[in-house]
Structures are given as structure tokens and as C-alpha cells.
């Protein structure tokens, strides 16, 4: 799901495979996902011999990022555009999560119905 | 209705929702707290048929069990929900709804990322990494219950015990910050 955050094994550079896992591909037109492409103004800042710079990638996609080099992990957040869509445009961004029945449920599974979403916890 | 547990404890969640007949989703990675700028639970969002948000992040309750604690009258909230279901009007204007929820700060975003790094480290047997990231998350978003209280059971602390009471005191002193509507 395009809106979802990810944690990857990396110390700051992503492989082509990891980029693909995130749903993005580097093409001459730029950074592309399905029919959408994001322009890459400075290719050399993004693409290195050893991989794609995750901080530059995050900036291009307007997603928060944290690199934990000690743990060898990178956490990439959701696109800020998706959250702004919720807060400023009042349009509910879609998401998919596992349900207690062992399946996966998306908000969009129930489109065209009124939905009362309740975030709760056991803590 | 769709319930999303900002939680990973399946056993507790099954217990809690045993009598529930609507979908219960498990958001162990706290996807929703970032996507919808949720900082505490319960948080209710009313979503119309066309995906427009009728009422954003709302501290609404199922009963008056906690009303002395929260100062919230659940019955009036239920009336508002019923009106929305019946007439399609939750009683909040678009301009009010747009202004109602503050966006996450860069620190609050980063706190969520560190929380996910912490649980990933924990899963990989990296206890030091988990601790380091949980500590960082707590520093970055000290008044965010989905960060500070949610991590308590994951660190062997009682979310209903002294550690929580201390958090509650800090949060109260800070003016009870909450990414959501007030007075509804």
C-alpha cells in the first residue's frame, strides 16, 4: 500500500530491489510508481554506485526518514501528502491492515458507506 | 464501524473485542498514528460515503465509564453520531474541521519512526537497539500517548501503574496536548 511506512535493512543506501519493494523504479523520466513519476533534479545526489541515498529519496517523496546506522536499519514514514490530505483536505487516506480473523482489511473495502473509524488500544 | 488497535498484543485484543461484531484491525506499526496524526486513544474519525471526513480526530467514548476523569459526556457524543448517520451532518463546519487538528511536528514524525525501529530491533533480538530507539521516541514526543504509553507494556512497564501516572502528570502539566478536536 502506497501510504504505508517501511523499515528496511540499510545504513543509508537502498538497493534497486529495496526501491522496488517500496514500489518505486528509477527511469529516465525520474522516480516512478505506476503511472506517476517524480522528477529527479539532481540524479547524482540520489544515485550512487552502492545504491540510492535514502535521505535524498525521502526528500523527493516528501516522507520522513530516520537512519539508525548502529542497528543498520532505516525507517521511512508515510508520504506527508497523505496526512495533509486528511487534515487539510478532509479526505480520508486509505490503509490496509491485518484483521483479527487472519485476513487484511482496507478502509476502501467499505467505500460508499459511512465509516466510524475508532483507534483504540489495550494499554 | 472499523476498530483499529494501535497495539500488537493479539491476546489482549481478542479478549477486549470478544463481543464485537465489526472489523478489528491490528496496527502494530502505528501506521494510523502517522497517517491521521493520532496522538491518543480513543480517537474517532467519522468518514462519509465519498471518503470526506465529517469529523476528524475526536475523543469520543462508548460509555460514561471515564467521564469523571475526562469531563466528556458520552451520551451527547452518541447523539451527534446518530445525527450524522441519519442526516449526514456531524455538526462541524469544514473550516472548523480543517483547523481542528494540528499536523505532526518533525519531532512527532520522527518519534513514530523510532518507535518502529525499536520494535524491529526487539524482533531481531537487539535489546540495546530497542531501548535506544524507545528512549529517543519518548524524548521526541513526550506527550504522545501512542508513543509513550504504548511502549510501556513493550518495555515491561505497567501502562496502568506508576510509570503511567507520572506520564499523566507531565501531560496534564503541559496542558493535556492532543491532536484532535476539543469541546465535542
Image (cartoon, coloured by chain):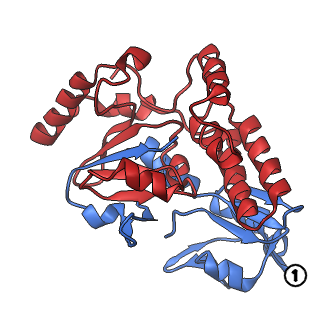
Residue of label 1 = A50
The answer, for residue A92, to whether it is visible in the render is no
Who's the residue at 53% across and 33% down the image?
B102
Q: Above or below — where is B180 with respect to A19?
A: above
Tell me where residue B155 appears, x and y as whole percent.
Answer: 70, 46
Rendered shade, chain A: blue
As drawn, is B63 to the left or to the right of A96? left
Q: In terms of depth relative to the viewer, which is nearer, B31 or B17?
A: B17
Q: Above or below — where is B26 with respect to A37?
A: above
Q: In terms of depth relative to the viewer, which is nearer, A102 or B162?
A: B162
Who's the residue at 78% across and 42% down the image?
B135
Disc 1 crowd rating (10 Å Cα; few below 14, some 14-19, many 20+) is few
Q: Chain letter of disc 1? A: A
Rendered shade, chain B: red
For the C terminus of chain B, which image quadrant? top left
As drawn, is A13 to the left or to the right of B28? right
The quadrant holding residue A13 is bottom right
Tell me where residue A31 appears, x and y as whole percent.
Answer: 64, 76
As drawn, is B79 to the left or to the right of B56? left
The answer, for residue B55, to whether it is visible in the render is yes
Tell me where residue A103 appears, x and y as whole percent.
Answer: 38, 73
Q: Above or below — where is A123 with respect to A43?
A: above
Q: Above or below — where is A68 with respect to A27?
A: above
Who's the residue at 36% across and 28% down the image?
B96
Who's the residue at 10% across and 39% down the image?
B86
SS at badge 1: loop
Amino acid at each position: 500500500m502506497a501510504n504505508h511506512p517501511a523499515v528496511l535493512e540499510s545504513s543509508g543506501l537502498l538497493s534497486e530491489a529495496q526501491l522496488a519493494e517500496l514500489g518505486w523504479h528509477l527511469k529516465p523520466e525520474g522516480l516512478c510508481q505506476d503511472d506517476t513519476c517524480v522528477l529527479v533534479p539532481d540524479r547524482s545526489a540520489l544515485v550512487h554506485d552502492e545504491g540510492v541515498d535514502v535521505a535524498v529519496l525521502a526528500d523527493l517523496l516528501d516522507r520522513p526518514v530516520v537512519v539508525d546506522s548502529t542497528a543498520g536499519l532505516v525507517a521511512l514514514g508515510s508520504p506527508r501528502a497523505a496526512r495533509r490530505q486528511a487534515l487539510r483536505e478532509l479526505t480520508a487516506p486509505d490503509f490496509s491492515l491485518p484483521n483479527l480473523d487472519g485476513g487484511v482489511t482496507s478502509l476502501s473495502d467499505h467505500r460508499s458507506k459511512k465509516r466510524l473509524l475508532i483507534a483504540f488500544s489495550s494499554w | 464501524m472499523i476498530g483499529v488497535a494501535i497495539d500488537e498484543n493479539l491476546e489482549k485484543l481478542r479478549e477486549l473485542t470478544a463481543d464485537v461484531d465489526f472489523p478489528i484491525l491490528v496496527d502494530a506499526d502505528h501506521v494510523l498514528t502517522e497517517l491521521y496524526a493520532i496522538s491518543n486513544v480513543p480517537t474517532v474519525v467519522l468518514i462519509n460515503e465519498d471518503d470526506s471526513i465529517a469529523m476528524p480526530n475526536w475523543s469520543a467514548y462508548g460509555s460514561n465509564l471515564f467521564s469523571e476523569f475526562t469531563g466528556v459526556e458520552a451520551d451527547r457524543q452518541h447523539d451527534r453520531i446518530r445525527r450524522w448517520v441519519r442526516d449526514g451532518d456531524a455538526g462541524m463546519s469544514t473550516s472548523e474541521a480543517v483547523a481542528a487538528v494540528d499536523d505532526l511536528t518533525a519531532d512527532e514524525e520522527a518519534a513514530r519512526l523510532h518507535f518502529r525501529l525499536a520494535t524491529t530491533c526487539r524482533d531481531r533480538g537487539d535489546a540495546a537497539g530497542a531501548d535506544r530507539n524507545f528512549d529517543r521516541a519518548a524524548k521526541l514526543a513526550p506527550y504522545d500517548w501512542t508513543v509513550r504509553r504504548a511502549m510501556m507494556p513493550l518495555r515491561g512497564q505497567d501502562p496502568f501503574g506508576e510509570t503511567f501516572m507520572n506520564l499523566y502528570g507531565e501531560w496534564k502539566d503541559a496542558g493535556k496536548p492532543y491532536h484532535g478536536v476539543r469541546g465535542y
